Image: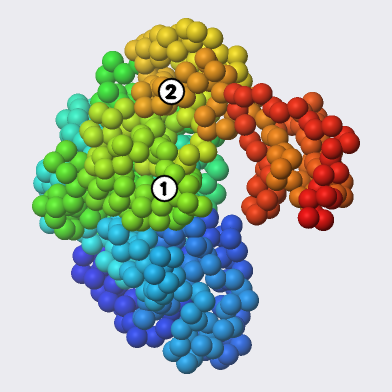
Amino acid sequence: MARINSPDDLERIRQEIRSRRDPNEPCVSICVGAGCLASGAGEVLSAFEAEIEKQGLKAEVDTKGTGCPGFCERGPVVVIYPEEICYLQVKPEDVPEIVSQTLEEKKLVDRLLYVDPSTGEKATHEYDIPFYKNQERIIIGSNIKIDPKSIDDYLAIGGYSALAKALLQMTSDQVLEEVKKSNLRGRGGGGFPAGRKWEGSRNAPEPIKYVIVNADEGDPGAFMDRALLEGNPHSILEGLTIGAYAVGSHEGYIYVRQEYPLAVENVTIAIKQAEEYGLLGKDILGSGFDFVVKVHKGAGAFVCGESTALMTALEGRAGEPRPKYIRSNVVGLWGRPSVLNNVETWANVPLIINNGADWFTQFGTDGSKGTKIFSLVGKINNTGLVEVPMGGTLRHIIYQIGGGIPGGKKFKAVQTGGPSGGCLPEELLDLPVGFDELTKAGSMMGSGGMIVMDEDTCMVDVARYFLNFLTDESCGKCVPCREGIRQMLKTLTNITQGKGREGDIELLEQLAEVAGEASLCALGKSAPNPFLSTLKYFRDEYEAHIKEKRCPALSCKELIAFHIDPEKCRACTICDRKCPSDAIKGGKSLIHIIDQEKCTKCGTCFEVCPPRYDAVRKISGEPVPPPIPEEARTIVRKRKQK
């Protein structure tokens, strides 16, 4: 691999790479991101390679394992170039047909195309699928086009041109001013302007400075940073190097959690390749600028997503936050100025330098510029990664992109911002998604997790779930967080178990106020948000749990019971056979009854009862009807005879 010593070398190598690739020759791109790999993408890729060789097409058709394109609900995703035909949920047994029909005869395999559930129309191309065409994929759109383990793929699409421009056509001051002008705000949760953070480090008197990638993505249901680091690691390295140049840093770190092995592997390979090309290390592109990057694997503590805790862990100590009398961009890692931004923030930097701040600010709102990647999960038809301009509404994301709620259920709430965020109800579906707008509504942007909930979700239990998560993840250093969250969890657990008492809501509000005001770091300060937002918008559910010992969503196990309606039971024996606790008394021609003492409330009987019978009822806050006498149970036989 020849070293690149100048922009001319970079352009020459880019052209050599492109010259070896005929854009008109077929290329099969298979998503091998973590989600698709779990669905068998590795076997699909191997099947393509074997079938193409078997058909004698190896010299004509290229195969490529790529990053995540976002449509996780329909993976593994396969895109065939140059036609850009998109096939979904591809299995190894589909491969021979794709090779023979699409690659050889240029025909479509209709059953693998996206079908619009409302119109029945088939979408041939990625950009025709509503999930994709309702997005603005300026960051994640390249994932399906490149092999994350190939720097040549990144160079072929213009990679490292922003770095060359920054180092050799701009001063570090100009780079800093362009980022400030773009009003890029940190995508990790706080939304602090990146340019202002960089400026603070640049102006700090200490000569040794650090730049850090926060890839410690710990929010339940969030996988935006993982997908970027797995799928396009060079974009993060390029952004990090540009940031280092602007700040005056010569050493960078990527802090990534151990649970992301594919991200660790791909970014480690990317660093090695960039070093071999001379895009990292000494005298980058002949500019005289030196910069090295190291990968640090974190132990998976959620609190290490907080800046000072992350830096403490980087120093080799237990990941605990420290007081921010002076911001970490002035006194951070080893007491030196340290710029910490998350993966998505760094990935935006090359786009801003290449296209200019004015281009970037065309996306978004006055206070929130650019696009944002969200992980859309939960009770939603199209789970996956979505990228939209700031300012788009929750309704647009959930219904236009996400396809709405499965099974005809009613939307109830969407939780944004991870465990530290809040739950927003149906009346706020038209709320623009921006840093300030979400905060005013009682939630937050966070890193971009978005969990959709339907009518069967108990909001009191949701608050309990996130408090339980945060109790486990609290480092325990400060009392308001360590003890306050634990007491909130204890009270919420009692409420969901039917042990709630008058005054519990007021107690929770007091605990929330203390934790929010007195905790050392953002974990404790924002921990009450799930409770406060659910109380604000769903107070009636709290009151039903406490006053009526009833769960309106029929979700809390201690407050529900199952009952078989004798008028509807057809003695099909399915529930009897499936009950794991042997709690159902039944038999052929006998009306079934549930032994409430044996019932574990697992809900199996409710799930397996045929819809045409609808005999099993889930009830809460009302007495269970007494079981019918043994002698009356044979009524089923008489009913059948009639």
User: Which secondary structure, mark 2?
Assistant: helix
Does residue 570 appear to the left or right of 99 in the view shown?
right
Confirm whether residue 211 shows in the render.
Answer: no
Q: Position of residue 343 (x, y in %)?
A: 36, 45
| Amino acid of disc 2 | Asp
State the residue at coordinates (33%, 30%).
443
State the residue at coordinates (60%, 64%).
40
Q: Which residue is mark 1?
A: 375
Q: CA distance from mark 2 to mark 1?
A: 29 Å
State the residue at coordinates (52%, 46%).
260
State the residue at coordinates (36%, 81%).
82
- Among the two numbered marks 2 and 1 on one chain, the one whose residue lies closer to the N terminus: 1
Would you place residue 439 above or below residue 351 in this image? Answer: above
Q: Position of residue 611 (x, y in %)?
A: 64, 52
Q: Nearer the viewer, residue 175 or 194?
A: 194
Does residue 35 appear to the left or right of 186 in the view shown?
right
Q: Position of residue 631 (x, y in %)?
A: 89, 36
Q: Which residue is mark 2?
A: 540
Confirm whether residue 327 shows in the render.
Answer: yes
Q: Nearer the viewer, residue 329 or 535?
A: 535
Would you place residue 427 above or below residue 150 in this image? Answer: above
Image quarter in which the N terminus is found: bottom left
| Amino acid of disc 1 | Ser
